[in-house]
Image (cartoon, rainbow, N blue to C red):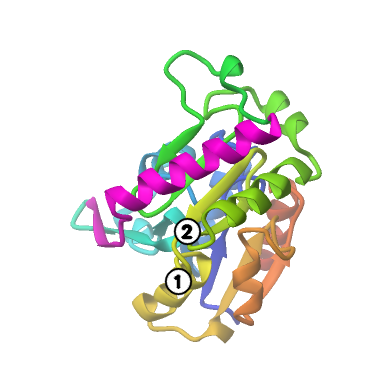
Amino acid sequence: MKKVLAFDIDQTLNVAKTPITDDIAELLVKCLDHFEICPISGQKFDQFLVQIVDRLKNPTDEQLSHLHLFVAQGTQYYRYENGEWRQIYNNPLTDEQVAKITSTIEQAARELGYWEEDKLAEGDEIIENRLSQVTFSALGQKAGTKEKYAWDPDCKKREKIVARCKELSPEFDYEIGGTTSINAITPGMNKTFGMTHLLEELNVKKEDVLYFGDMTQPGGNDYPVVEMGIDTITVRNHEDTGFALRGILGIL
């Protein structure tokens, strides 16, 4: 029996950039009675709260103590202690690294014709500093789900951007995630880092963890977990995840 259930977020627990459904929220609360639950994603802490935590129906403090938020691919970690979320560690990029990554991604996207500034909602941004990573979101964070799904369904546009970024600034790593995103990090600061720290913080072994993700192919942001040898379930969407969780809960 596994001790830990770890999850990517977008396309694994939810429709990209939207709060989890009532069904997933109910399943996660039930899972908190049996497992350590560990979402790990490139998103910011605030998005973890909006998309997951705030959707849980009346969780007890005891249940929340088993929910672990591995933010920005696990380069930041938050846990619930004494009635509040506390940051346990953080590994931010330097200002110089943020500036270099930002200019690199913008140059690559512009050269390839994928800089969609005219499609941004008011106050939105294409490149976002998430402290320990920089994230490119081609249509911004506020774009509609339909538009996001349609922009790069086969990842070909982002693969071209990543290839050009590697030519311009090979000292960084670039991973495809979500529906329109690329996460730029320093080498090693991907989900390998996050999952390694998850094992350390929870004092568990790889064999104790079951991971759910939609981008488990080489180059996807879930692939480092596969490379670590952690048991992984590849899902297409949150419905697949819900189906699997109902099966797991049904055998307890």
Amino acid at circle 1: Phe
Amino acid at circle 2: Gln
Query: Up-down: is 209 above or below 189?
Result: below
Where on the picture, by quarter, is residue 102? top left
The N terminus, quarter of image: bottom right
Q: Residues within 10 Å of mark 1 (few under 14, many from 20)?
A: some
Where on the picture, by quarter, is residue 196? bottom left
- Mark 2–mark 1 distance (CA, rounded to whole Å): 8 Å
Please say whether residue 70 is one of the residues in the magenta stretch. Answer: no
On residue 73, the disc is 2
Which one is earlier in the sequence, the residue at label 2 or at label 1? 2
Which residue is found at the position 60% from the left and 70% from the top? 224
Q: Are marks 2 and 1 in contact (CB under 8 Å)?
A: yes
**Does residue 251 show up?**
no
Which residue is found at the position 61% from the left and 17% from the top? 119
Residue in front for this viewpoint, 76 or 122? 122
- Percent position of residue 230, x then y: 62, 78
Residue in front for this viewpoint, 46 or 132? 132
Dominant secondary structure of the residues highlighted in magenta in the image: helix
Which residue is found at the position 65% from the left and 34% from the top? 111
Residue in front for this viewpoint, 157 or 81? 157
The outermost residue toward the left is 82
The C terminus, quarter of image: bottom right
Magenta residues, as a range? 84-113
Label 1 sits on residue: 193
